[in-house]
Each structure stands twice: as structure tokens, then as C-alpha cells.
Image (cartoon, rainbow, N blue to C red):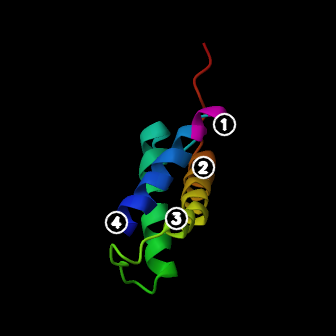
Amino acid sequence: MAVLAWVMMGLALWHFTIFVPDRFWGGIVGAFVAAILGSFLFGLIVNGFQVPSRADTTVVSAIEAIPGTLIGLGLCYLVGTRRGNEPLVH
């Protein structure tokens, strides 16, 4: 259940990427992958590379994924900006 909470928090925060310019590496799909992977990996790191059982999953489990999601999205944006992923101007 903790993995579900981490991934859902990453997905929820990913929705806010529409408010920033689309310079993510891989576009909006790249931002989606970065948010999901960041939340999952950070959740694992916080819990010592063990997935908590269903009984150990609380609201705090979902909150643990927020920094990982932001780190993943930030790195994806940084890589996209450095690679010149600029939106097309017509």
C-alpha cells in the first residue's frame, strides 16, 4: 500500500507541471516518468529500501514522496533546459 501512496502522490504533484513552461526532458511524458520514479525511489530510500506493510502505511507514507517527486521533476526540467528543449514559436 505504501508504494501506491508514493506513486499517487507523485501523480498528484505531476498535475501541477502545467503551470511551468514545457521544457522537461521528454516533454510532459518525461515529467510524468520523472515524478513517478522520483516518488518511488525516494520512498524506498526513506524506508531503508524496504516496502512497509499494509499495517504500517499511514498518511505520512504519502507525504514522504513529496521531496522525491520534486527532486525528480527538478532534474528532468534541468536536463531538458540544458538540452535546449525550447517550445516551438510559430
Q: Is residue 25 above or below residue 71?
A: above
Upstream in the sequence, badge 4 or badge 1?
A: 4
Is residue 75 visible in the rendered image? The answer is: yes
Which segment is the magenta one? 16-21
From the image, tell me which residue sits under label 4: 1
- The CA span between labels 1 and 2 is 10 Å
- The CA span between labels 3 and 2 is 28 Å
From the image, tell me which residue sits under label 2: 77
Q: Secondary structure at mark 2?
A: helix
Closer to viewer: mark 4 or mark 1: 4
Q: Is residue 46 above or below residue 40?
A: below
Q: Is residue 73 above or below residue 64?
A: above
From the image, tell me which residue sits under label 3: 59
Closer to viewer: mark 1 or mark 2: 1
Other-residue count near label 2 (Cα within 10 Å), few / some / many at <14 / 14–19 / ≥20: many
Q: Are marks 4 and 3 in contact (CB under 8 Å)?
A: no
Q: Amino acid at mark 1?
A: Val
- The CA span between labels 3 and 1 is 28 Å
From the image, tell me which residue sits under label 1: 20
In front of the other: 49 or 30: 49
